[in-house]
Image: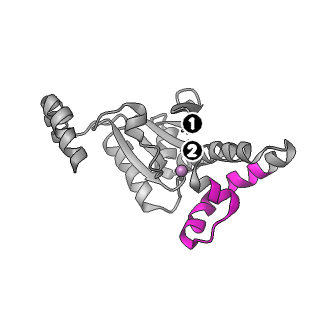
Amino acid sequence: LEGNRLFVEKEFNNNLDYYRDIAHAQHPQVLWIGCSDSRVPEDMITGSRPGTIFVHRNVANIVAFNDVNIAAIVEYAVAHLKIPDIVICGHYNCGGIQALDEGVEENYIADWLLISGGAKEKVDRIAMEQSLSRMQRLNLLAEENVRLQIKHLKNLSLVKNMHRKGDLPCIHGWIYDMDSGRLKVLIDGRTER
Ligand code: CO
């Protein structure tokens, strides 16, 4: 609440026109699908203001086929808000990715991470062939998980049908490195459809 008081004083009250404008309607240009991790706040790491990013975050930035929650968000984003770009952003040091790699006791988390099983199988194979260190394996798994979720997103009927007609959205794959604060582009959605 103290943080909100400062926000009103320093940011909101100094930009009243902007905040009155977006109070009437939002026109975000990006749908962000990221991890729930508290260390990856999409607005802060991209320097974005309220009104610019439509957001869905869950454990390990997963796009599930049978998840009405994410389907409704994607539908609202592309069909109603006409958002042209979707970013799936993973991150290194992800607890979800570590749990995917090592397995967990918690039932719901284990079930949720099953959706990323394909990425783990692929990385296990590569890690064996190239004798990767644990950190290299986990970093690769975070990246392969983003690639897999992009595949899932492109296979949702809603997105597939739009792409068939040559319509947007562009789908981008990024990774956030919390050691440097930098975002890395894995897949540039403008060139890879
Ligand atoms: Co995470």
**Taking 16 as reference, is 46 left or right?**
right
Of residues 44 and 159, the one drawn nearer to the viewer in this rendering: 44
Q: Is residue 136 left or right of residue 66?
A: right
The residue beneath circle 1 is 179
Question: Magenta part of the protein: which range?
Answer: 98-124
- Res 79 label: none
The reply to whether residue 74 is visible in this rendering is: no
Q: Residues within 10 Å of mark 2 (few under 14, many from 20)?
A: many
Residue 139, position as x, y percentages in the image: 67, 43
- Helix, strand or loop at label 2? It is helix
- Secondary-structure class at tag 1: loop
Using the image, tell me which numbered label, if any, was put on residue 150: 2
User: With respect to residue 175, does 99 lie above or below?
Assistant: below
In the rendered image, residue 9, in percent from the top left (x then y), is placed at 15, 36
Please identify, in this view, whether the residue under mark 1 or under mark 2 is nearer the observer: 1
Q: Residue at x 69, y 57 (%)?
A: 101
Q: Amino acid at mark 1?
A: Asp
